Each structure stands twice: as structure tokens, then as C-alpha cells.
Amino acid sequence: MPINEQHAHPSAKRRGLYDDRLDFSKQLLKCTTQGRPTIDFLADTLTHVLNVSGCDAIELWLKEGNEVFRCETYRDRGDSSDFRIIPASWQSDTEPLTFRASAYLDSLGMIEPREVPEGSFYSRTTNHSVWFHDIRQPLPQEGIPPFLPLVEDLRAENRYRSLFLIPLHFGDTQIGCLVCKHTRKLRPTRERIDYLETISAKFELALLHHLSQTKLQERVKELTCLSGIAQIRSVRELSLDKKLQDIVMLLPPAWQYPSHACARITVDGVTFQTPDFQEGTKRQVSRIHTGGIDRGAAEVHYPDDLKFLQENPFLEEEQNLIDNIAGQIAHMIEHQETERAKVDLQTQLIRADRLAAIGQLAAGVAHELNEPLNTILGFAQLLQKTQGIPGTAYTDLVKITEAALHARTIIRELLIFARQTPPSRTRFSLNRIVEEELHLFESLSGNSGVEIKRMLDPCLPDIVADKSQILQVLSNLVVNALQSMPQGGVLTLQTASHDQAVCLVVEDTGTGMSEEEKNNIFVPFYTTKDIGQGTGLGLSVVHGIVTSHGGNIQVESVAGQGTRFTVTFPCSLTDQPGEGTHHDSE
């Protein structure tokens, strides 16, 4: 039957909502089973509460941590109603104000019920609910409740007169309060209080069920996200970039408002983000660290134009989740770098074994060939000096001599490559070596249309090195440069010093090299020249000599534009040569 029907809201009378409590319970149950976001759930359920209660507005205070979230369903015009989220702070005529419901909710349950004399400002029930008879009346001089600040906040609204505050509990914990608002002044009756507290109890059950389901759904979403990341990490064929792009797509569905969330992962300046990513001030961030180094961040953002029930739309569990994801990304980066280092190490070991084997073979072959080759060369040169030798025979002897000299050059390079020639280190100027070597190549370069440019540092420090081996380095680099410019060009030789090092630059404007050629130029016996025009050892020898002197060599080349070799040696800053060295007497 209707409760205090003469004061019931006209729309409630017309709909007969007071007479159908079962229908109200069904509507709440239906809302709890739809799995909708909390804001939508509250909008629907509070509308049902408003319709069945006969009040002019229903406001909900929901406590989470130290914050109290406020929302309200109120009658707009006629039978229509509207839902709104109430901000925690607002601007008064003189100063900014903050709603103080949190302190009230803590004290509401401690107020004991008592008999309230007629005309009192408020009444209390055995369930610790509080009825404010007329919020616009002056406050009593005595017996002011501990929730006085709340009364002042409610009076600031200046729209409603009678309010009924019903606490909501989860077990023994108070989680919020339902505020029934009336625009008219109403006296509480036992029937009205019991009826509203019954409605509140049903709403409380629906709310607790929804919050429990929501927490469960959030955990399921988190576990689904982590499971997806584990599957992505397990696919060895995927690159790190592809994995990060796939992972960033898993983040928004794992957050509380997936339809509005967007995500971004940044690693070493490279960004991976969801489509239509929009950066906002409402964001959750976790830094990615490996070995104490900041490598980037994982982020989830909400657009600034969206309104949420909470001031902070992110859950504490979501911060734990994004920290977990950032940690997994850090492990992925470390794993990739470890695997890359392992591959590099294996490549170096394979190359070292290959070089050692080639070195042993080269040394053995060189020693075995040296003696018969010297015999061939000696007899060929001796026969060339014989008087009266026919012209064709003499021409053949010249060819034999040239072939023998070429073979001896190969053997010398093999011995250098195999480190069979003991170094003899002296102190000398690299500029002097460049000048001496260029004298030998100037006539050859002039005939081939190559212009030689010198850019030698006059203040270049001396180096301590094997002079003959450095000559070999320069000779090989210059020959390579000249051979790459069959139609002529410019050969530039430059020396410079910096950071206790001496640099030699050999640059040409020749044919250049492809990326594959550049990656293999120091591999023994690798050559792009025709048969008989190169041994494939020249640059390998250069690399071996430079590294044995504690230096390094870098190559820059673009196909069709030329090549630039930069050789760096440590310079000598002392006049006392080390063991096995002496001054060059030039």
C-alpha cells in the first residue's frame, strides 16, 4: 500500500510504483546483470529509486579511499528525470569550496538514535539514518551534530528543504550514503522512514553486487591482458617492434573505461600507440628501466573532455597492472639485447676460428712456395740478361717475372696476414710516409686522370708503429682507391689529430660500394675484382695491421659516389719509446 500517500510525488501515484515493489526489485536485478559501466548502472538504478521513492531527487555519495564521489538523479520537467555527476569542488561567490561528506560518513554511524522533540532540526533512526526536517531553518544553538560542515554544504544548494540521509554498508564498513531530497518541508513518519530505508536496502544490495561484479571483471580483464602479453612474448619470430605494437593494443581493453582509453609505449625514443591516440591530463604512467637506465614508458590516457564519476578515473589495481607491463617490456628489451650480444659473440668466435685457420694455412703455403718462387724469379731475371735471346723469348721471360713478382706480393701479404713477419716499431711522422708513398703513385694517377689532393696537418704528432706495415696500409688503400676510379676522379689524403689519436683519411670519388660489399670488405679472400686483378687480402691485411697497432678503421661508402676510409692510430706523446721500439733515423 502507498506510504503517506498524501505526500507522495504525483508521478509516483500515476505510475502505481508504490504498489509494485516486486517490479522495482526486478528492475534492480536486471540492472545488475547487464554488466554495464558503473556510471550507466548508477544512472539506471538511481532513476528507478527516484521513481519508486516519490522524492524530488536522489543523490548518492560513494566512498572510495579518501574520496567521496557524488552523483544525482533529479526530476527535470513533469515525469522526466536527469542524471548528473556532481563535482567534489565548486566555486562560491567568494571562494572555492570542497564537499566535506567524507568526514560526515565517518561520523554518521557513530551517532546514536534518540527521541527528538517536536520542532527539532533533525531526527535519527535506529539504522543511523538522519532526517533533516527543513535544511533552510537556522541551526539549533545546542546539540549541533558532528556533521555540521555537511549541513552547511547542503544548505549552499538552496533548492531542497527536507533531506533523508540513509547510510550504505558493506558488512561493517560504511561505503556511502543515499540522500532522498524533497523540495517541500516534510515531517518524517514511521511509514515513510521504513519505506525509504527498505528501498535503500534493496539499492544497497544491487550496488554491492554490481561493485563485486565490476571488481571481478576488472581482474578478468587484467589477467586477459597479461595472458595476451605472455603469448606475444613467446613468439620468437616476432621482432621487438612488432611485439610492442601488439602489446599496446592490449592495454585499453584492460582498463576501467576501455571505450575511452588509449595507450602509448615509448622505448628509446620510438613510439608505439593505439589508433587515434589522444594525450590527456588524466593518464597513468609507468617508466621502463633496464640496468638502472630509463628506456621509456608505458602510458594509458583518457581524453580531457570526458567526465568520470571519480576525480581520478584510474584504479589502484590498474597502476599495479601498468607497472607489471612496464616490467615485462623491460625484460623483453634485456632479453633481446642478450640474444643480440650472444649472436654477435658467436659471429666473432666463428670469424676468429676462420681467421686462425686461414692464418695457419697461409703461413704454411707461403713458406712452401717462397723457395721455388724465388728460384723461378731468379732464373727468369738471369735469362733476361742473356745476350742474343730471341724477342719472343724475352717477352715470355718478362711475363714470367711479372707473374712471379705478383705471386711474391701475395705471399708477403699472406705472411703479414698470418702475423709471420715480426714487427719492428719506430717513431715517425705519418705525414712523411704519405708524401713518400704519393711520389710512387703520382705518375700512375696522372696517366689514369686521377687528381690527388693532400690535406696534411703540419702539427701532426708522431706515431710508434712498424713503418713498413704502415706503408703497406697506405699502399693498399691508395691502390684500392685508384682502381675504383677507372674513368678518373679525385683522390684525397688527409691527416689530422684529436684526443691523443692520429687519423689518416683516404677518400675517392669512385664507384663506391653496396651495403653487402661494405659488410664483407675485411673478410679474407673476398673481392669484387676480376680474376687476376685482386687477391681479396688487401683490406684484410690493412685491418689486421691497424688493429695490431691498437687502432681502428672505419669505412663510409655510397654506391656510385665514392668511398672514405678513416684509419686511427694512437699517437705517441712521450720521447721514451716502449719495448721493442726505436727512433727512425730519417
Image (cartoon, rainbow, N blue to C red):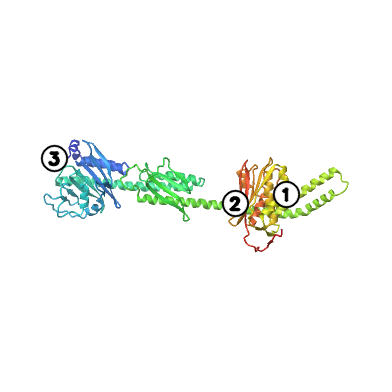
Which quarter of the picture shows residue 447? top right
What is the quadrant of residue 420 in the picture? Answer: bottom right
Q: Is residue 525 left or right of residue 223?
A: right
Judged left or right of residue 48, residue 297 is right
Please report the residue visible at 13 percent of the width from the left and 50 percent of the height from the top.
Answer: 120
Q: Report how far apart the C-alphas of labels 2 and 3 lie in the structure.
A: 92 Å
* Residue highlighted by disc 3: 6
Q: Is residue 1 visible?
A: no
Label 1 or label 2, whichever comes before in sequence order: 2
Residue farthest along the front direction in this orientation: 458
Mark 3 is surrounded, within 10 Å at the Cα level, by few (under 14), some (14 to 19) or many (20 or more) other residues, namely few
Q: Earlier in the sequence, mark 3 or mark 1?
A: 3
Q: CA distance from mark 3 to mark 1?
A: 121 Å
* Residue that numbered label 1 is attached to: 440
State the quadrant of the C terminus.
bottom right
| Count of numbered circles in the view | 3
Q: Position of residue 540 (x, y in %)?
A: 66, 51
Q: Quadrant of the N terminus?
A: top left
Q: Nearer the viewer, mark 1 or mark 2?
A: 1
**Looking at the picture, which amino acid does disc 1 mark?**
Leu
Residue 347's disc is 2
